[in-house]
Amino acid sequence: MVAKPITILYGPDALTRHEKLRELKRQLGPDDTLAGNVTELDGRQLRLAELRDACRVLPFFGGRRMVVVYDLLKRFEPPKAGAGQPPKKSKSATDLEEWKGLAACAAEIPPTTTLVLVDDEVKDSPLLKILAPVAEVIAFPTPTRDRVKSWIKERVSRNGVGIADEAVNLIEEMAGADLWAISNEIDKLVSYCAGRDITAADVRLMVSHSREENIFALADAILEGRTNVAQRSFARIVQEGTEPLAVLAMVARQLRLTVRAKAIGTKTPLAEMAGRLGLAQWQAKKAVDMANRFTLARLKLVYEKLLDADLAMKTGRCHPDDLAVVCLIGDLGTGKILDKT
């Protein structure tokens, strides 16, 4: 079976999506050749001609190369209309006419090049529908509670140890469907247990709401433009062992959940809200509280800035350390980004 020239990875499960991309990169060859054979682009402003040129570049050392484009599909999602208003015309409608040609261009991609499109949650992108026939499309939906529990067991078993069912249930209750956060907690538990099986007592001792509370505090401080508090909160989370990219993913997830809570309706019974968001009730309450305190416009604006920082690191505009996040926090703290209107 001939491999399709385009691979599409999309969905809100950021960790599994990230690991799949890393797996695809490893298929290119040794790590020391990846830097020259992987090109990463920001799809929000990209032109089709620029992408075609990037795909035509020959690989170094006679191997294979990959072109990764972030956030191209979401760029063409139609904007939502307000209640009682007619659907808004997308500002990207003209651009979409240009990008419809990508499906035809797929046949021009050299056999030595793989084009990978990476997006977060995509609900109604016309470009996704256009490309689906010529692409391998892999979705990464928010995992169900049963899937999270199975994933925890599988992740722990990779380290050659076991985990009690009660311990699995505790981790899932504390962290919800955030696999990136759960992965960090599992790493700490495996290190602490030093080769023995993980028990519920270990989870109670090592895993608490503190990391999640820190993420909420960081999101709060960023939304309110409290620069010093946000920078201290970010530094503390990184010092505790969470990678900057993971911090961005966690804060972005919290903002998405807050927007969803606002859309569902903040007067919805907490148990129902938790079920619809796939969260523990205490997490759902945090999302509702945040939804009540911030406008939808502000939540979306900060979310866009988080994407800017994330893409700055992924596409090489900023080294993948804490610099992009510190710059983001500094910008938000100026008060120019967060207009409280």
Image (tube, rainbow, N blue to C red):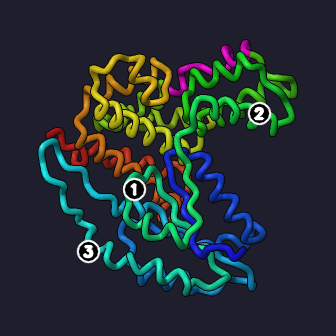
The structure residue drawn at horizontal position 69% and vertical position 19%, both measured from the top left corner, is 203
Q: State the residue position of label 2.
A: 156
Marks 2 and 3 close (CB-CB < 8 Å): no
Q: Which residues are magenta?
A: 200-212
Q: Position of residue 336 (x, y in %)?
A: 22, 48
Amino acid of disc 1: Asp
Is residue 222 inside the magenta stretch?
no
Q: Position of residue 63 (x, y in %)?
A: 74, 80
Q: Secondary structure at mark 3?
A: helix
The structure residue drawn at horizontal position 25% and vertical position 32%, both measured from the top left corner, is 294
Amino acid of disc 2: Val
Q: Residues within 10 Å of mark 1 (few under 14, many from 20)?
A: some
Q: Position of residue 322 (x, y in %)?
A: 51, 48
Question: Which of 308/52 is in front?
Answer: 52
Q: State the residue position of label 1.
A: 308
Check residue 94 in the rendering and tell me which mark sits there, or answer none.
3
